[in-house]
Image (tube, helix red, strand yellow):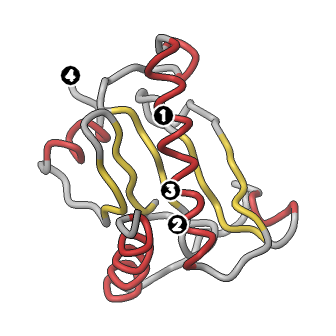
């Protein structure tokens, strides 16, 4: 059975897409810790990040770096925090979270409630910077 992320890649479930390549996909988390909180995934459905072969793992990290740079240029923050938890969805993924302090990436905190317009504006802004390259 396809994961929710595979369904997002296929367009069966809508998302706020940031970037896409032949092998990787990035979109806004719909339950964000901060504005710009993004998920980066391989298109190859693999449950656990460290089960990816070296080429896919390296490619995912390099793609995530490009996305993180675009987020940093778009969202006012000190850093882009990176988290890999891997329990909530059986599809390898990386959280990129704009942060100003260590507790900004605490997943037990209440999530932001953003409007569709806010999500769209954030996604469009980050995507525009990503696509400048």
Lower sequence index among marks 3 and 1? 1
**Element assignment for label 4:** loop
Residue of label 4: 1
Residue 10 at x, y percent in the picture: 14, 42
Label 1 Cα crowd, 10 Å radius (few <14 / some 14-19 / many 20+): many
Lower sequence index among marks 1 and 4? 4
Label 3 Cα crowd, 10 Å radius (few <14 / some 14-19 / many 20+): many
Q: CA distance from mark 4 to mark 2?
A: 33 Å
Residue at image location 47% in from the left, 11% down from the top: 53
Asked if disc 1 and disc 4 are in contact, CB closer than 8 Å, the reply is no
Residue 60, numbered circle: 1
Residue of label 3: 67
**Element assignment for label 1:** helix
Q: Relative to 47, say whether 88 is above or below.
A: below
Asked if disc 2 and disc 3 are in contact, CB closer than 8 Å, the reply is yes
Find residue 4 and report its image quarter: top left
Residue at image location 41% in from the left, 62% down from the top: 133
Residue 28 at x, y percent in the picture: 43, 63
Q: Relative to 96, say whether 74 is above or below.
A: below
């Amino acid at each position: 059975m396809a994961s929710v992320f595979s369904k997002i890649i296929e367009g069966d479930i809508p998302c706020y897409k940031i970037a896409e390549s032949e092998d990787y996909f990035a979109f806004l988390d719909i339950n964000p810790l901060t504005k710009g909180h993004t998920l980066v995934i391989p298109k190859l459905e693999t449950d656990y990040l460290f089960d990816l072969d070296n080429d896919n793992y390296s490619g995912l990290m390099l793609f995530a770096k490009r996305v993180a740079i675009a987020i940093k240029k778009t969202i006012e923050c000190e850093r882009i925090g990176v988290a890999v938890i891997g329990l909530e969805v059986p599809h390898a993924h990386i959280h990129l979270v704009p942060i100003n302090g260590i507790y900004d990436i605490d997943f037990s905190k209440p999530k932001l409630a953003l409007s569709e317009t806010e999500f769209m504006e954030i996604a469009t802004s980050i995507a525009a910077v990503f696509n400048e390259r």
